[in-house]
Image: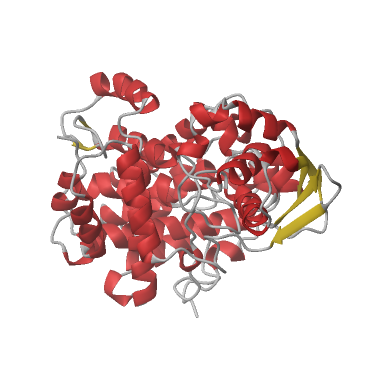
Amino acid sequence: MSQHAGQGFAAEQLGRFVAESRWDALPQGLRHEAKRSLLNFIGGAIGVGNTAPIDMAMRVLVPLSGIERVTVLGRGEMLDPLGASFINAVSANLLDYDDTHLQTVIHPTAPVAPAALALAEQRGLSGAAMLNAFLLGAEVACRVGNAVSPGHYARGWHITATCGVFGSAVASAKLLGLDARQICYAIGIAASQSAGVIENLPSAAKNVGVGNAARNGLFAALLAEQGYSAAPSAIEGALGWARAMGDEPVVAEITDALGDRWEMAANTYKPYPCGIVMHAVVDACLALRRDHALAVSDIAEIIVSGDQLLLDRGDRVVRNERDARVSIHHCAAVALLFGAAGLREFSDEAVHDPAVVALRARTRARLDAGSPRGAATATMRTIDGRVLEVTVLHARGSTEQPLSDREIEAKVFELARHGGFRGAVDDVIAGVWQLDEAATIAPLVGMLRRA
């Protein structure tokens, strides 16, 4: 049992836990999960390194960057740690291909790993130190998310960004060698920098929120290092973060069984570059295509049913590829048309493909109040009157059907090709698996810079 339970406010208990944590004391399976998360993150970042959104952000940040610079994944330019944290978080989140903590729908690695990488590179720290700090930060982000779910997300707060800032602060504070009180202060400072709204999910502003979570968390830890303080009750206090942005928090979700129960042990990885609640839609429609040899002209209507979250996120008009990644209609259409839902199927070309547009128009979204979270049912009515139906309770990539190490590696290769990354991907993958044995992370991040 945790020795910290019931001893002070949540930030104080987290501060003590984080300060005392050691990589070699963590369960082997959890340490491996940290590497899986980091590898998946790297794939997402190098997959978009030369795209327009990253180019635009770099044009803003390069002239503003400080002298000490670190790696921007998939780019030749380098930025100061704050700027690199921002860009690398945006990159990892851009394709909606990042990891997911299913209970909260937080994508934990994108807002946390960039700060840990930036600090570890700047200060010449070991791979084990970086991985330990990242894992602790991601764990804290998920635990804070548990404490305010589902009301926080339902109010419109983008939980990856709003809770991710706490994870970035914790990871940064750990790497800076801060003591328990300073870590508590870093968490409190992060509470004043938490933001991001669901309304912006179909736009680039969504990624800005995730980038800010990484940068602001690092900034919070740097301020705490210099002596800035914060209220120990900044999370759960009467006028604290949780009540300001949602309902009364379940503080035990943050503090209970620290070191015994690990949220990151249940982290998941997407097989499709789209919103996590769309994955069961894709799987159900792929199953319909596989099991019934139908031409598209045979389809009269497709009805996709699921819980309220699925409809809230996915029942939308599709105007661009960002909309497509969170569209029930698009996911169903490409799965049935192409038997795939990869990067090509969510491209701008696919969005405007007349066959895809036509099948999206024949797709309907319906509420099934009894449907479990993450499940979906696809019902197809054919021109000749048949009704064909598939229900998927646990999508591929979920905790019940997790991606293997090899599947994550294949995903990294796919993303590297997509992003035109010319580095040695095999060496990058090997570097991640062996990172806890590396004296510094310099060899790994060096491989991730574009020549």
Query: Residue 225 vs residue 331: left or right?
Result: left
Name the one closer to the observer, 446 or 229.
446
Q: Position of residue 405 (x, y in %)?
A: 37, 65
336 above or below 323? below
Q: Can you give x and y, in whole percent of width and height, for residue 364 in the image?
A: 77, 39
Residue 181 visible in rendering: no
152 relative to 254, above or below: above
Query: Is residue 371 found left or right of 70 in the rendered image?
Result: right
Q: How many marks?
A: 0
Is 176 located above or below residue 87 in the figure?
Answer: below
Query: What residue sits 49% from the left and 49% below the top?
Result: 107
Left or right of residue 73: residue 301: right
The residue lying furthest to the bottom in this view is 1
Give the percent coordinates (x, y) of residue 19. Answer: 34, 63
Q: Position of residue 437 (x, y in %)?
A: 17, 67
Could you say which is closer to the camera, residue 60 or residue 293?
293
Indicate whether 110 appears above or below 91.
below
Of all residues shown, which one is farthest toward the right?
Answer: 385
Q: Can the viewer see residue 331?
A: yes
- Picture quadrant of residue 419: top left
The quadrant in which the C terminus is found is top left
Colour scheme shown: secondary structure
- Foreground pick, 178 / 396: 396
Front position in the image: 66 or 391: 391
Residue name at image x 58 percent, y 58 percent:
102
